[in-house]
Image (tube, rainbow, N blue to C red):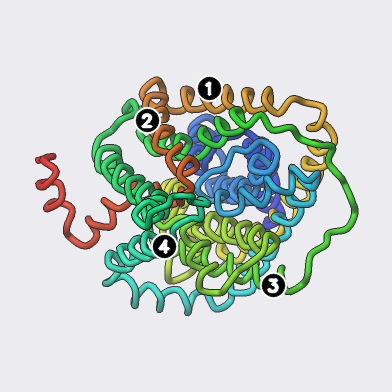
Amino acid sequence: MPVVYLIYALVGVLFGGVLSILPGLHPLNFAGIGVFVYLTFPMDPLGLALLFAGMLVAYAVIGTITTTYMGSPDDSTMYMAFPNQKFLVYGRGHEASVITGVGALGAALLLILIAPISPTLFPIFRKITTPHMGWILIGVAAYLLQSEWPKDWGSRAKTRLGRLKDGWASLSAGWLTFILSMLLGFIVLNTPVTPADRAFQNIMPVFVGFFAVPWVLTNLVSRATIPKQHIGKDMYVRKMDLLRGTSAGFLGGMFAAFEPIVTAGVGGVLAGHSTGTQGDIQFMVSGAAGRFAYYVGAFFLFWVPLLHLTRGGMAWITSVVYQPRAESDFWLLVSAIAVSAVAAFVLMYLISRFIARIISGFSYTKVSLGVLVCIIALVYGFAGIEGLILMTICTGLGLIPPLFRTRRLNMIIGFFFPIFLNMCGLRADVLKVLGVY
């Protein structure tokens, strides 16, 4: 019965909600946990697939709590990390969590609204873009590199050359980050770094090193103090901020979900530039909507009739467990997303209220140290000692952007750039130039 399958999704929300609070986790880890569940507890394949859907929805909604209160972002939450942290310092961390949750709910609503036209719309997009996919992705990388402007360092250099040098400091660091990440990508994406039995976690230490560990380390160095958090019943948010932020984030997130390799952060920046998103509220709402559209939207595309586009780790794992067979499966997933999104928002609200009440009583330095210990333990548990070594290397790269005030997204674009080249048929030529073979 359909109600039974919705219960599977709600169980997934509870399970995913607990995992989402652990800093440093990524949907790739959720997919790996899904494999463990499937091998250990045999169950109805469709029910398991909807359990995965609930876990993914929970991650997209509840996972922002670690960004707000613990300063442990990933590639998708970096797009809204700074406003969330600003709200926390001003005693409005709970408000920031609720605002991002509303953005995720807005994306869920838009995803449900486009469901009836999805079997017609997305196959057309796929037919148009597939022959040009490689060049589209290279164009995205070029745009991100060229759209970053010099930062105002308050240069006091007396000569024009000195001021020019200061202006180009961040831009040069951004290009250096891109190049080093690209070289790392050629190695990691072509060589199994982690043990063979954990190869599906090969990328997990990279993302943790790029984003989570540097953020925690900067928290430790800054020794920030968290004031008492205000827990109010009202949000001071304009309707236009919600509408513009949700629509922009959903547009960027679905672009990232539809195109291979592009992440939510990249899609969010592109959508923000194209729609003129501005202000902290729109920034957070857009980031949350893009994150939801990216993770849940990619899973959604796998179930769309006449499309069955496989994007993201959870969709790949589900394709092994279960293949949607009828249009009724698609509408069952849509129902599960709707129910799970509401349940995840309520759970996020309750967790956020609880953390907001107690966090001011803890040393943020000790909290950050605890987060760092959790991250190291998780990476070791999922990827072994090799994963810790890879995480350490990536942490060195991840520290360049905050030190030189350049985009962290350059790491993601650079890391996956070898795949872009491969899609254009240029990978072998570049590998020869680099002396790989």
Residue 9 visible: yes
x and y, in percent, of residue 43 in the image = 56, 40
Residue 196: quarter of image: top left
The kind of residue tagged 1 is: Ala
According to the image, label 3 marks what residue?
Answer: 243
| Sequence order check, earlier mark of 2 and 4 | 4
Which of labels 4 and 3 is toward the front?
3
Q: Say which of 1 and 184 sits in front.
A: 184
Label annotation for residue 377:
1
Residue 385: quarter of image: top left
Is 87 on the left-hand or right-hand side of 147? right
x and y, in percent, of residue 262 in the image = 41, 58
Label annotation for residue 309:
4
* Mark 4 and mark 3: Cα distance apart in space: 28 Å
Label annotation for residue 133:
none
Which residue lies at the image location 57% right of the left edge and 56% below the top edge? 291
Is 236 on the left-hand or right-hand side of 284? right
Which of labels 2 and 4 is toward the front?
2
* Mark 1 and mark 3: Cα distance apart in space: 40 Å
The kind of residue tagged 2 is: Ile
x and y, in percent, of residue 108 in the image = 65, 63
The kind of residue tagged 4 is: Leu
- Secondary structure at badge 4 equals loop
| Sequence order check, earlier mark of 2 and 3 | 3
